[in-house]
Image: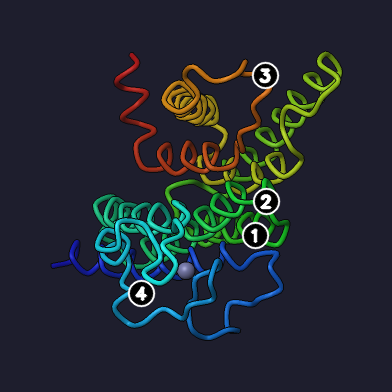
Amino acid sequence: MYFLFAALVGLILGSFYSVCASRYGTGNTIFRPSRSYCPQCDHQLTMWENIPLLSFLLQKGRCSHCSSRIPFFYPLSELTSMLWAVLAAAHTADPLEWGVLMVIGGICIVASAIDLRTFILPDYLTYTGAVIVLGASYAGLLDVTFIDALLGAGIGTFSLWAIAAIYKAIRKIDGLGLGDVKFMLMLGALVGWHQLSIFILVASVCALVFCIATLRGKAGMSTIYIPFGPFLAAGSLITYLYGTNIIAFLR
Ligand SMILES: [Zn+2]
C-alpha cells in the first residue's frame, strides 16, 4: 500500500515536473496558462490527454490534434519520478526522509529535463538544491552527516571545476558547463565526500552507456554535445540509495 501510494505521488509529481521543465525559458510560468497544451498547435489537453504516462502510451507519443511528437522528456520525467518515489520508499520507512528525498529528486528531475531540452542548468534550482541538502543533513534528516555533506559539496565541486578547467586548457573548448559544476554543490553534498568516487564512477558509467546506446554509427564523439547534468543527477541519486551496496559489490 505504501509503495502504491509512493508510485502514485511520484507519477503525479513527475507530470508536474515535465510542465515545469517544458515551460522554462518560454515566457510561460507554471501557473499560466493553467491548462496544459500542445506546444506545436496550442491544442488544449483534455482530462484524458493529461493522465501521466498512460496518455502518452495511448496516443503513441503523438498529439491527438496535430500528430506532432510529444517530447520524450515528458514520459521520461513521469517514469523517473515514479521510480524514484518507489525506490526512496524502499530505502527508508521514515516519512520525513522520504519527503526530503522527494524534494531532492524533484529538483534533480526538473534540472535534468531542462538541461536535456536547453543545455542550461538554472542557478535557482542548483543553488536551492544545495541549500536543501545541506539543511536536511544538518537537521539529521538524511543518511549523510552535515560535515560529510559540506566536504562532499566542496571537494566535488572543486574537482569538477578543475577537470573542466584542465579540459578547456588542453582542448580549447568547454567540455563541462559551469552549470554542471554548480550542480555538484547539491549532488556532492547528497552523497558526502566518502562516496564521491563511487558517485563519479556511477555517473560516468550512466553517460557511457547512454553514448554507446544512442550515438552508435553517428559522427565522431567529440563533435556531439550531450548534457552531463542528467547523468550527474542519476549518479548522485543512485549512490545515495545504493552506494554501500556498490562498494561491497566492487570489493
Ligand atoms: Zn498538437
Residue 7 left/right relative to 187: left
Q: Is residue 135 above or below residue 204?
A: below
Mark 1 surroundings: few (<14), some (14-19) or many (≥20) residues within 10 A? some
Task: Give the CA separation, mark 2 to mark 4.
Answer: 27 Å
* Residue corresponding to mark 1: 125
Checking the image for residue 50, the label placed there is 4
Nearer the observer, disc 4 or disc 1?
4
Task: Give the CA separation, mark 4 to mark 3.
Answer: 39 Å
**Residue positioned 30% across, 56% down in the render:** 60
Mark 2: which amino acid? Leu
Checking the image for residue 222, the label placed there is 3
Nearer the observer, disc 2 or disc 4?
4
Q: Position of residue 70 (x, y in %)?
A: 44, 58
Q: Position of residue 94 (x, y in %)?
A: 30, 62
Task: Give the CA separation, mark 4 to mark 1.
Answer: 26 Å
Mark 3 surroundings: few (<14), some (14-19) or many (≥20) residues within 10 A? few
Nearer the observer, disc 2 or disc 1?
2
The quarter of the picture where the N terminus appears is: bottom left
Checking the image for residue 121, the label placed there is 2
Mark 1: which amino acid? Leu
User: In the rendered structure, which disc, 2 or 4, sits on the residue that comes first in sequence?
Assistant: 4
Task: Give the CA separation, mark 2 to mark 1.
Answer: 8 Å
Residue 176 left/right relative to 65: right
Secondary structure of residue under mark 4: helix
Instruction: Indicate yes or no: mark 1 CB to ligand 1 under 8 Å.
Output: no
